[in-house]
Image: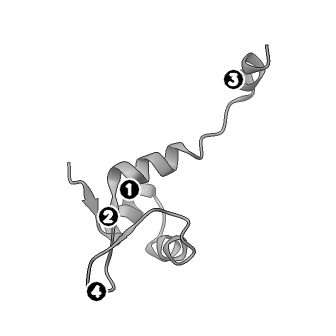
Amino acid sequence: MRRWLSVTECADYLGISEHTLYHYVCRRRIPFNKVPHSNLVRFNRDRVDHWLESGTVETIDEALKGGN
């Protein structure tokens, strides 16, 4: 599995449009890397996975168990 994703690959991976992904990049809402001496961006698959996992919301059962 490739470590670096292009904009198209990352958008497909996340199930969002390229337009939405560019919006996230412009607002620095998703981790990305710029290719030196160009306007190209690439996405590290591990960092994208970590970013996704950081947005995990507990189920009500998990929240209730945590409160005991």
Bin the neighbour count of mark 1 within 10 Å (Cα to Cα): few under 14, some 14-19, many 20 and up: few
Q: Amino acid at mark 3?
A: Glu
Camera-near label (2 vs 4) is 4
Dot label at residue 62: 3
Q: Which residue is mark 1?
A: 13
Identify the residue at the far left of this view.
Answer: 1
Bin the neighbour count of mark 4 within 10 Å (Cα to Cα): few under 14, some 14-19, many 20 and up: few
Q: Amino acid at mark 2?
A: Glu
Mark 4 → mark 3, Cα distance in angstroms: 45 Å
Q: Are marks 1 and 3 in contact (CB under 8 Å)?
A: no
In the rendering, at what x and y percent does residue 63 appear?
A: 74, 26
Camera-near label (2 vs 3) is 3
Mark 2 → mark 3, Cα distance in angstroms: 33 Å
Q: Which element is circle 4 on?
A: loop
Vertical position of residue 12 compared to residue 24: above or below:
above
Q: Amino acid at mark 4?
A: Ser
Q: Which residue is mark 2?
A: 9
Identify the residue at the far top of this view.
Answer: 68
Q: Which element is circle 2 on?
A: helix
Please report whichever mark, 4 or 3, sits nearer to the chain's N-terminal start: 4
Q: Is residue 24 left or right of residue 41?
A: right
In this orientation, which residue lies closer to the viewer: 47 or 13? 47
In the rendering, at what x and y percent does residue 17 appear?
A: 47, 70
Q: Is residue 48 left or right of residue 37?
A: right
